[in-house]
Amino acid sequence: GMDGAGGAVVWDTRIDGWAVSMIGIESTPRGSGDDWEASGTLYPMASRKVARALNRASGRRPAVVLANLAGFDGSRSSLLDGQLEHGAELARSVVNFRGPLVVVVIGRFHGGAYVVLNRRLNPELTIVALDGTRVSVIGGSSAAEVVLGREVRAEMERTGNERDQAVRDVAERFDEVHGVHRALEVGSVDLVVAPAEVRGVVSRLVAPTSGAGLSPARPTPPRAGRSAALA
């Protein structure tokens, strides 16, 4: 029943002894020809698989999503395969999730993933991003191709470059402006941490609660505007 869902990987494991359901997204392209799938992209069955994993973990154990996500695939074939339905199922699983839900941005975080894995849908969700990652509602390459046509044409006139190079230049500038620290400033992510800090921060976020707060032995992680080193 999960044929074609290999773009999402789910396993039950532990972080510093705390039981969690870990969800990862394939970060390299898969397949070939008509079966080729882009990296960091949720295809219909992978969307369904992640939704079912969250539903299974809800109320039983925390969930941690390692997110290198450009969003959902919106191709004609994916739409015919129920991408909208499975995407909606994933959104419902986030809304209904009971317990700590932690999203760790390890690469990029754009598009539908940015919208669905969002604490506006579930206040228990926390987004932790590695320093140097890219977080925005649309990625630079997509923005240059779809939204910033005027800037691309101006870049071509200014530099004399071909369109492909002008698109890359505009995309790079967009990503520089809409980096992870800007996402922190506007509240799109809760924490920006160095790779060496990830385990400790996530461990504290998934630790069993005691009363209204986290375990006294594992202090509450910092929110936006504070360094993870202060935790």
Image (cartoon, helix red, strand yellow):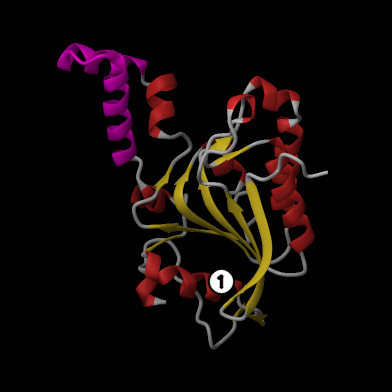
Which one is nearer the viewer's eye here, 43 or 224? 43
Q: Where the C terminus falls, by quadrant?
A: bottom left
- Check disc 1 and report its element: helix, strand or loop: helix
Q: Position of residue 37 (x, y in %)?
A: 58, 34
Secondary structure mostly taken by the magenta-highlighted segment of the chain:
helix
User: Which quadrant of the structure image shows residue 213?
Assistant: bottom right
Q: Which residue is mark 1?
A: 205
Magenta region: which residues?
149-176
Please indicate whether residue 127 sits to the left or right of residue 52 in the image.
Answer: left
Q: Outermost residue, front direction?
A: 32
Q: Is residue 190 magenta?
A: no
- Residue, far right: 1
- In the picture as drawn, the residue positioned furthest to the bottom comes out as 217
x and y percent of residue 229 in the render? 36, 74
Q: Is residue 121 left or right of residue 53?
A: left
Q: Is residue 157 magenta?
A: yes
Question: Where does the image place residue 224, in percent across and percent down from the top left?
Answer: 42, 61
Rendered location of residue 59, percent (x, y): 77, 67
Q: Amino acid type of disc 1?
A: Leu
